[in-house]
Amino acid sequence: MHIFTALIAGLIFGIGLILSGMTDPSKVLGFLDLAGKWDPSLGLVMGGAILVGLAAFRSAARRTRSLLGDAMRLPTSNLIDRRLVLGSVAFGAGWGLAGYCPGPALASLASGGAKALIFSAAMLTGMVLFELAERLRARPRHAAGTAD
């Protein structure tokens, strides 16, 4: 049941991205171009998403189990640290340069466009490099002068 629910949710999300224009990089870049020919239409899409998300998170915060019966695992940290800021800057820079963020890029793969494929490959490469860096960072450090 979980895999079916995930499939349906992903399909609805992908269709919503396509219908809203979020999979069209030129539309996204037009929204981000405040100094040029600004296209504010995606602001309504984002506003709607924020309202739905706000309602969903408020509802989820009052629950101990998900709608499918799993334990709720909501984020508990509200710490704004260097890693969060740098990650946000990298996300925004990638979005502004390519006109894609992860969800729309993956939804755009269905159209077979080269730009979505290149962006998705670069995104996945970045994710793998991040995981490798995290594993290296988490490895216990040996004391100076001791043998392995």
Image: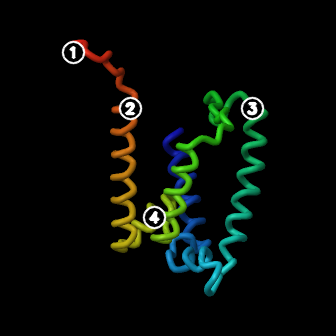
Location of residue 79 with respect to 86 vertically, above or below? above
Identify which amino acid the numbered label 3 is placed on.
Answer: Arg
The disc, 2 or 4, on the residue closer to the chain's N-terminal end is 4
The disc, 4 or 3, on the residue closer to the chain's N-terminal end is 3
Identify which amino acid the numbered label 4 is placed on.
Answer: Ala
Helix, strand or loop at label 3? It is loop
Identify which amino acid the numbered label 2 is placed on.
Answer: Arg
Identify which amino acid the numbered label 1 is placed on.
Answer: Asp
The disc, 2 or 1, on the residue closer to the chain's N-terminal end is 2
* Label number found at residue 148: 1
Q: Nearer the viewer, mark 2 or mark 4?
A: 2
Q: Which residue is mark 3?
A: 63
- Counting from the top left corner in percent of width and height, residue 9 is at 57, 52
Q: Nearer the viewer, mark 4 or mark 1?
A: 1
| Disc 2 crowd, CA 10 A, few/some/many (<14, 14-19, 20+) | few
* Label number found at residue 89: none
- Counting from the top left corner in percent of width and height, residue 32 is at 60, 74
* Label number found at residue 137: 2
The disc, 4 or 1, on the residue closer to the chain's N-terminal end is 4
- Spatial CA distance of label 3 from label 2 is 35 Å
The reply to whether callout 1 and callout 3 are in contact (CB within 8 Å) is no
Helix, strand or loop at label 1? It is loop
**28 or 88: nearer the viewer:** 88
Would residue 1 be visible to someone looking at this image? no
